[in-house]
Image (spheres, grey):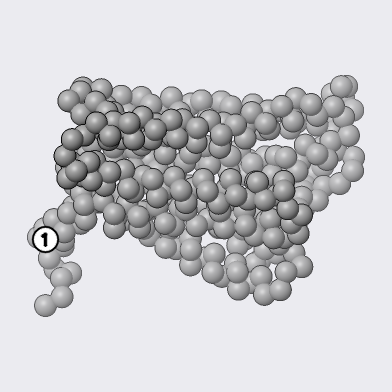
């Protein structure tokens, strides 16, 4: 490849869900999804900060998940692009958009893996839990995950600059999708295809496989618990996490399998993918609030504090 002859367009055009009826109503609905997601995750983060009883390794991960959910959501950019007709995006902002979308998706996935590790140690090694899963250890895990993610996706985005575009600058997506961009290449894009496949494995396959292995080990440990009440109590501590994993991975995997086995209309695929990326950040804080006794108890305790008493109805 002769880098002197590389041609990069000054802008890309994001088509999104063009041609579908009543899409403005869909974007307005997305705004309410974003509002609930922002409010729910902010409230959960506030509760974790305010209650010292939640200053534990597990809730450090939960806090990180909520922070990632707020940053990961694509809704503000989607609304700006399609509701206000800003579908032209310059090359550099497009690559920046690509980096942050994949980076925060990856952080969300790996944070669920960190929470699975927390549950594994808590159930399989309960007597050693506080020695193994410490706050410094969890901060280290989150820090390493962030550094690895930033490094990998910086390389992924950087390699786009070696692509020469001479076919089109139109992306049939709702963000700057790496796979769609490298398919527009006129020169050798084999390294981009390889890094894209590695990205898919890093984002979806590897964390999910490790989570499945983790819960297989947890299942074996639960079988050894003699008392049914203790077994149910242990299962309850995993309920919130299992629901988050299900709503995070099941739609994503289903969409990928369906796209291979079933001839989807492009707009149907985009609609499914956009919902898959926007609904989980809204549901995560709701599930952790309603399904976790510790969080509910913390909310009740905060409500009783004098600083909040002035807002109580008389």
Q: Is residue 15 left or right of residue 77?
A: right
Which residue: 56% across, 31% down? 202
Per the image, the residue denoted by label 1 is 304
Q: Residue lying farthest bottom?
A: 314
Which residue: 13% across, 56% down? 301
Q: Quadrant of the C terminus?
A: bottom left
Residue 172 lies, with reference to residue 121, above or below; the image says below
Total number of numbered labels?
1
Q: Is residue 293 left or right of residue 102?
A: left
Residue 293 in the image: state x and y as whole percent: 21, 52
Q: Quadrant of residue 3?
A: top right
- Residue 88 seen in render: no
Q: Quadrant of residue 283?
A: bottom left
Q: Quadrant of the N terminus?
A: top right
Q: Is residue 271 left or right of residue 5?
A: left
Q: Nearer the viewer, residue 232 or 35?
A: 232
Residue 225 lies, with reference to residue 23, above or below; the image says above
């Amino acid at each position: 490849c002769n880098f002197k002859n590389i041609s990069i367009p000054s802008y890309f055009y994001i088509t999104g869900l063009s041609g579908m009826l009543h899409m403005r109503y869909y974007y307005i609905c997305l705004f309410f999804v974003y509002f609930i997601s922002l409010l729910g995750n902010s409230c959960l983060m506030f509760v974790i900060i305010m209650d010292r009883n939640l200053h534990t390794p597990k809730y450090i991960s939960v806090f990180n998940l909520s922070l990632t959910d707020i940053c990961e959501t694509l809704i503000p950019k989607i609304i700006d692009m399609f509701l206000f007709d800003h579908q032209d995006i310059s090359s550099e902002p497009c690559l920046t958009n690509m980096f942050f979308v994949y980076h925060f998706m990856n952080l969300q996935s790996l944070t669920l893996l960190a929470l699975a590790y927390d549950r594994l140690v808590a159930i399989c090694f309960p007597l050693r839990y506080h020695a193994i899963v410490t706050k410094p250890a969890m901060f280290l895990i989150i820090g390493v995950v962030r550094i690895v993610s930033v490094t990998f996706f910086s390389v992924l985005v950087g390699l786009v600059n070696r692509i020469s575009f001479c076919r089109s600058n139109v992306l049939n997506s709702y963000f700057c999708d790496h796979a769609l961009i490298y398919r527009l290449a006129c020169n050798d894009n084999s390294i981009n295809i390889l890094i894209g496949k590695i990205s898919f494995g890093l984002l979806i396959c590897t964390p999910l496989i490790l989570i499945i292995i983790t819960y297989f080990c947890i299942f074996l440990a639960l079988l050894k618990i003699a008392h049914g009440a203790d077994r149910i109590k242990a299962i309850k501590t995993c309920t919130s996490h299992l629901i988050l994993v299900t709503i995070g991975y099941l739609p994503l995997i289903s969409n990928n399998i369906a796209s291979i086995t079933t001839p989807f209309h492009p707009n149907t695929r985009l609609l499914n993918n956009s919902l898959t990326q926007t609904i989980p950040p809204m549901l995560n804080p709701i599930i952790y609030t309603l399904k976790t006794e510790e969080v509910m108890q913390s909310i009740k305790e905060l409500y009783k504090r004098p600083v909040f008493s002035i807002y109580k109805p008389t």
